[in-house]
Each structure stands twice: as C-alpha cells, then as structure tokens.
Amino acid sequence: MQPNDANFREHLARILLFSDQNASEALRNYRIATGMNPYSASSWLGLAQAQLILGNQSASLQATKNAVDVDPTTPSVAWEAANLFIITGQTDA
C-alpha cells in the first residue's frame, strides 16, 4: 500500500474514524481518497459518516448522495446510504 493510493487513504481513514475515534483526521483522509478515486462509494460513505460525527449534516447528506450516484445498485451501499439518510432526516430519499 502506498500513501498516494486511494485505497490506502480509505483504510487509514477507517482506522482513524473507528479505532482512534479521530473524526477530523479521518475526514481529511476520506477527502484525499475521494479526490483520488471519486468512483469509490465506500469512500464517499466514510466521508459522510465523518461529516455527520463532526456535525456537518449537509456535507454528510451530499457525500451520501455521491455514494449512491457512484454505485446505485449494490445492496450494501444502499443499506448504508439509507441509514445515513434516515439519520439526517431524509426519509423520502
């Protein structure tokens, strides 16, 4: 794994978010990951989670929409996106 690899940044962000509970550093790495690979729904969903934890509900909602736009048919993406939509009060989505 290389630091200039989007997968590396996504995995690092996941560790920072869930193990270290450092949402701001996770957010920074998720932003790098989505910048390197904007077609990764899991990176967008991680970004949405970090934004939500930091209280940025509108940014979380946009990242969730990006994840669904990138991968609208995978059940795990739909499930996680639906949970994030519900948390942000977007029950129609």
Image (cartoon, rainbow, N blue to C red):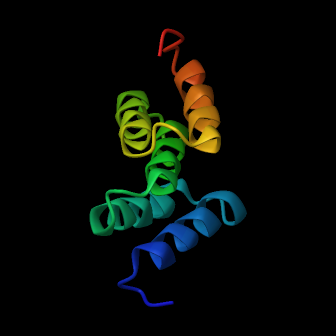
Residue drawn at the location 54% of the way across and 11% of the way down: 91
User: How many numbered circles are shown?
Assistant: 0
Residue drawn at the location 67% of the way across and 66% of the way down: 20
Residue drawn at the location 50% of the way across and 67% of the way down: 10
- Residue extending farthest right: 19
Task: Please state the horizontal and vertical placement of residue 86, each as a whole percent of the image.
Answer: 59, 19
Task: Please state the horizontal and vertical placement of residue 1, each as a whole percent of the image.
Answer: 51, 90
Instruction: Say above or below: 26 vs 50.
Output: below
Residue 64 located left or right of residue 79: left
Residue 76 picture quarter: top right
Task: Please state the horizontal and vertical placement of residue 52, each as a whole percent of the image.
Answer: 51, 37
Instruction: Say above or below: 5 vs 12.
Output: below
Task: Please state the horizontal and vertical placement of residue 41, each as a whole percent of the image.
Answer: 46, 51
Instruction: Say above or below: 41 vs 16.
Output: above
Instruction: Name the one closer to the observer, 34 or 74.
Output: 74
- Residue extending farthest left: 35
- Residue extending farthest bottom: 2
- Residue extending farthest front: 73
Residue drawn at the location 39% of the way across and 33% of the way down: 65
Residue 4 located left or right of residue 7: left
Instruction: Say above or below: 67 vs 79.
Output: below
Residue 18 located left or right of residue 81: right
Residue 31 picture quarter: bottom left
